[in-house]
């Protein structure tokens, strides 16, 4: 029988930015890859990329949550709140803020409750770095964001549940 942790690690979510030939995939909980259609990066503006990446983040999170719920539904686990204590935990979890940057400072991603995302790209980035460097920066920042959020959720769990 497959362990739940293995099922969760096996979740893969593949999305495309609305109105753009930009795709992303989330796998193994934290690994995100980003790819552009031919010449898309070369002609993109930072503001268009910010919008596309924000949409991608939202779509990846929603897709992961759907598959997570489906995996949990196949077990006897109850992840829904049972009482006011649980409701308070979920309310605080939904307010967790995480903000990270790529190591070169060009990509900044923020999230509140992993539902309200914001992406900022330093002006001039598209002209100054290659598509490969850009996707590596996005991957790095995305992984940091997920890890920071998970760390904060774990701290909150310890506070609530010991």
Image (spheres, rainbow, N blue to C red):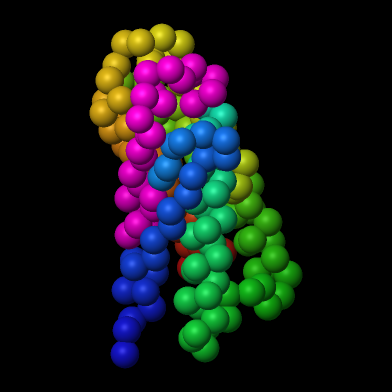
Residue extending furthest toward the right: 84
For residue 47: magenta? yes
Percent across and percent down for residue 83 are: 71, 75
Q: Quadrant of residue 117?
A: top right
Q: Is residue 120 above or below residue 118?
A: above
Percent across and percent down for residue 152 are: 47, 50
Per the rendered image, the range of residues in magenta is: 25-49
The image quadrant where one finds the N terminus is: bottom left
Q: Is residue 105 above or below residue 65?
A: above
Percent across and percent down for residue 47 are: 54, 20
Q: Nearer the viewer, residue 81 or 44?
A: 44
Residue extending furthest toward the front: 38
Q: Is residue 152 above or below residue 20?
A: below
Q: Nearer the viewer, residue 90 or 129?
A: 129
Percent across and percent down for residue 13 are: 43, 57
Q: Residue at x 34, y 68 (%)?
A: 10
Query: On the rendered structure, is 108 left or right of 86?
Result: left
Q: Quadrant of residue 3?
A: bottom left
Q: Residue at x 32, y 36 (%)?
A: 140
For residue 77: magenta? no
Q: Residue at x 63, y 61 (%)?
A: 89
Query: On the rendered structure, is 126 left or right of 113?
Result: left
Q: Residue at x 27, y 25 (%)?
A: 133
- Whether residue 152 is visible to the viewer of this picture, yes or no, is no
Count the labels in the image.
Answer: 0
Query: On the rendered structure, is 126 left or right of 90?
Result: left
Q: Is residue 141 above or below residue 68?
A: above
């Amino acid at each position: 029988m497959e362990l739940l942790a293995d099922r969760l690690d096996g979740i893969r979510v593949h999305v495309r930015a609305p109105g753009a030939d930009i795709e992303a995939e989330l796998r193994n909980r934290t690994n995100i890859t980003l790819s552009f259609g031919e010449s898309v990066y070369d002609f993109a503006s930072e503001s268009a990329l910010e919008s596309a990446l924000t949409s991608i983040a939202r779509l990846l999170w929603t897709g992961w949550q759907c598959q997570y719920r489906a995996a949990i539904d196949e077990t006897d686990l109850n992840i829904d709140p049972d009482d006011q204590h649980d409701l308070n935990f979920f309310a605080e979890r939904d307010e967790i803020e995480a903000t990270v940057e790529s190591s070169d400072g060009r990509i900044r991603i923020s999230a509140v409750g992993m539902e309200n995302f914001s992406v900022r790209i330093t002006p001039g980035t598209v002209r100054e770095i290659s598509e490969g460097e850009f996707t590596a920066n996005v991957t790095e920042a995305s992984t940091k964001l997920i890890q920071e959020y998970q760390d904060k959720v774990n701290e909150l769990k310890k506070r609530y549940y010991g």
